[in-house]
Amino acid sequence: MGATISQAFGQVLREARTKAALSQERLALDAGIDRTFVSMLERGKRQPTLETLFRLASVLGVSPATLVARTWAELG
């Protein structure tokens, strides 16, 4: 069984955050969300709203479309 969308997005988010050299706490603070929510996103336990997706992308310096495309690719 393959990864779920939530799990794939979590992997993409973790990779983008690591590449941007940001901690979960810094990403959350800059995006205006709770750090525990970033952790839940990365573990595939939660899904972001469209607004949160845009906030995360902005802080990470990528487009929301890039995060979605990478998630799609992760799903195979």
Image (tube, rainbow, N blue to C red):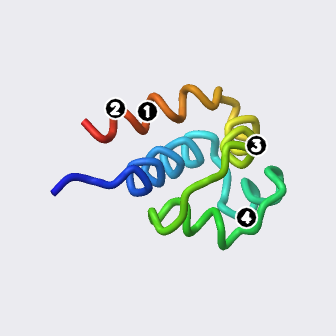
What is the C-alpha distance between the residues marked 1 and 4? 23 Å
> Residue at 54% across / 64% down in the picture?
46
In this rendering, the label closer to the viewer, 4 or 3: 3
Q: Viewer-nearest of labels 1 and 4? A: 1
Pointer 3: what residue? 55
**Disc 2 marks which residue?**
73
Q: Nearer the viewer, residue 62 or 3?
A: 3
Q: CA distance from mark 2 to mark 3?
A: 21 Å
Q: Is residue 5 left or right of residue 21?
A: left
Vertically, is 42 above or below 67?
A: below
Tell me the quadrant of the picture where the C terminus can be found: top left
Q: What amino acid does circle 3 point to?
A: Arg
Kindly identify which residue carries mark 1: 70
The reply to whether dot 1 and dot 4 touch (C-beta < 8 Å) is: no
Do callouts 4 and 3 mark residues in contact (Cβ within 8 Å)?
Answer: no
Which residue occupies 76% across, 68% down? 34
Horizontal side of residue 37 vs 55, given as left or right: left
Q: Of label 2 and label 4, which has the lower sequence position?
A: 4
Mark 2 in CB contact with mark 1 (< 8 angstroms): yes
Q: Quadrant of residue 62?
A: top right
20 to the left or right of 66: right
Measured Cα–Cα span from mark 2 to mark 4: 27 Å
Q: Residues within 10 Å of mark 4 (few under 14, many from 20)?
A: some
Residue topped by disc 4: 25
